Amino acid sequence: MTAGPTTDPRAAAPGTATPPKRRNTELALLGFAVVITLVAQAIVDLTVTGSLTAELATFGLWFTALWAVAHLVVRRWAPYADPLLLPSVALLVGLGLSFIHRLDLAAQQAGSSVSREDAPIQLVWATLGMVLFVGVLLVLRDHRLLSRFAYTLALVGLVLLAIPAVLPSSLSEVNGAKIWIRVAGFSIQPGEFAKICLTVFFAAYLVDKRDVLALASRRVMGLELPRGRDLGPVLVAWMLSILVLVFERDLGSSLLLFGIFVVMLYVATERASWLLIGLGLFAAGALVAYQIFGHVQQRVDSWLDPFAYYDGSGFQVAQALFGLGTGGLFGAGLGGGRPDQVPVAKSDFIAAAVGEELGLFGLVAVIIVYLVLVERGLRTSLICRDAFGKLLAAGLAFAIAWQVFVVLGGVTGLLPLTGLTTPFLAYGGSSLVANFVLVALLVRISDAARRPAAPTGPPKPALGDAPTEVVQT
């Protein structure tokens, strides 16, 4: 006797793509990202050196293998994850490697005394980040487990933030900011990992306290203001950000952490008053810091008029603006500009290199890739079934968006320089590895959010096998 058809509890919900379709879409987009990266590398080699280098084949195989492994891991252990997350990251990482390689060639042509090439090192960092990406997906099968370790992660995040502040300047300070740990030629920026730890803590804390924080005591000018006793968490987060600003001279991390917390608080409570309170607190703290600390005054003054400080602190921003102006709408072409004229173009100012050689259209295209990545993270937050996952996905997505906005604001003169790096695009091992972990968490939450809910009762038998039932009316 042939059994009738049965209902698969893992089948996709009506109107949604099944896991094979999702993964096939992801594979096609990953292939597109790899092709774009290899074409960009080839154009750089042909334009700058006049021939293709032998390293291009090695790079192509290595880069392709990285994303093939990532795709297979996601296909096996997170089959319902959003198919746009991984390709967006692959394209950003690939473009970043292409521009770092282009700047390496420019340094060689200029006769730089530094013989080390940074593009291969960045590829090694990407490989390490991919190892952690795979490790997170294999070890963390349920994102809700992180909420059990929220306070432990908060302690880890605070320690990571505090270490550079207590170290001697010779081991922690670069360009006036004490945000590094440098030992025996090895350097790491612990604040990138602290960002993730504290975001997990914020999500767990706000899920527990959101009912209390959502209470309003009175209305002022149409806004429902919270009770005074409930301002404690915001004040603690504000004090933490100010301490980072004061002791580490790091405006970027201070702005990033406080912004993440305030936005997550708004998402948890749906009260716009928290945004205004957070903005007012940070503005007051920044104003006091400007009056007291010389390094903050220097950053702000060079931001307001970089050309007045062209021979000093404003040189970086001025050169970046010259490069963006030279690029115009369509750019000078890969290998056709002089992005190496901007100091530390590989890390802090890689967006200026993109704008000079790909033009305004190319830079906007890169921003759109970031928007796709952030939008998919926020969409994951909307459809996630548990409150902790909703807040965590929203916080992680906003962290990427906020960091990109702050970095691009500094490069274009919209905001003061912060020292943050452009996620996935810029040179820097700490940032790249930490952001791979961030994306792994988004993939895990996305898989849980899109996975059909398990049936609550026993599966219904097929129609041919169902017993006869008498229905009385």
Image (cartoon, rainbow, N blue to C red):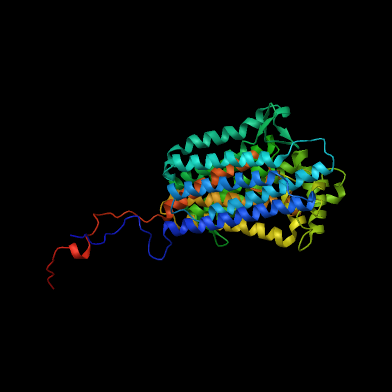
Determine the residue positioned at 21% across, 65% down: 463
Quadrant in the rendering for residue 169: top right
Quarter of the image containing the N terminus? bottom left
Split into 4 quadrants, where in the image is the C terminus?
Answer: bottom left
Q: Position of residue 470 (x, y in %)?
A: 11, 68
Q: Nearer the viewer, residue 270 or 318?
A: 318
Q: Residue furthest bottom?
A: 473
Q: Is residue 144 left or right of residue 288?
A: left
Residue 295 appears left or right of 23 = right
Does 114 sit left or right of 63 as displayed?
right
Residue 356's image quarter? bottom right
Query: Which residue is more in the foreground, 15 or 113?
Result: 113
* Residue at 69 percent of width and 31 percent of height: 172
Q: Position of residue 395 (x, y in %)?
A: 54, 49
Q: Is residue 391 left or right of residue 162?
A: left
Which is more toward the observer, 325 or 145?
A: 325
Residue 115 in sight in this render: yes
